[in-house]
Amino acid sequence: MNESMMPPKNIVLIGFMGSGKSTVGRELHQRLGYPWVDTDHLIEQRERKSIAAIFAESGEEAFRDLETRVLEELNEPQVPRRIISTGGGVIGRAQNRALLRGLGYVVWLHAPTSVIVERTSKNRDRPLLHAEDPVARIEALLAVRKPLYAETAHLKVDTAGLDCGELATGILESARYFFSCQL
């Protein structure tokens, strides 16, 4: 099988905000040397504004359209080996879930509500948490998203209590097995 026919060997990180996608993505990038793409950062660069500004000016649906476009571009076969960190709500669309699975090995980084609250409480750039009761908002979003993360992911990893080195090691071992079965 020639290189262009090989399945992509991307590692795709999904999960709720504050679950560790960016931190673990950087660690995997360091270990593998694969290019690292954070879809939220890519959208901010292209739009020349923060995600909070996109939400405020254009609404969530417009932001979700931008996410879908980015995933479609990442599914182009030119660069088959990347680490991809996604936004927490990217799994909301069936089209995006299919695109994510087409990209490679999808890992759901999961954290309990208490850990998410702790990790996100200092960040004012989270438009979906601008609520009177952020804990209730997180729990409501998780109730909707957990089944979608489960449907999309090849692997679920609980990030509470593990450092990014431990997480990266476990993900890499699982990914090696996954990709060896794809040949």
Image (spheres, grey):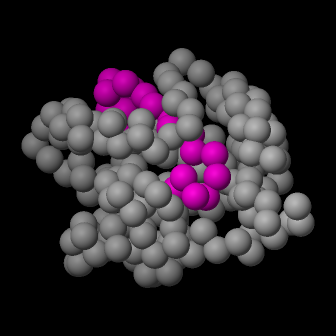
Q: Is residue 115 left or right of residue 2?
A: left
Q: Is residue 163 left or right of residue 183?
A: left
Name the spot of residue 5 as percent of width and height, x first: 79, 66
Name the spot of residue 165 as percent of width and height, x first: 71, 30
Q: Which residues are magenta?
A: 100-121
Q: Is residue 148 above or below residue 45?
A: above
Q: Nearer the viewer, residue 43 or 92?
A: 92
Q: Residue at x 54, y 52 (%)?
A: 101
Q: Nearer the viewer, residue 142 or 132?
A: 142
Rendering quarter of residue 82:
bottom right
Q: Is residue 127 above or below residue 149?
A: below
* Residue with the most extreme top position: 161
Q: Residue at x 81, y 47 (%)?
A: 183
Name the spot of residue 108 as percent of width and height, x first: 50, 38
Q: Nearer the viewer, residue 9 or 60?
A: 9
Q: Nearer the viewer, residue 95 or 27?
A: 95
Name the spot of residue 8 as percent of width and height, x first: 72, 58
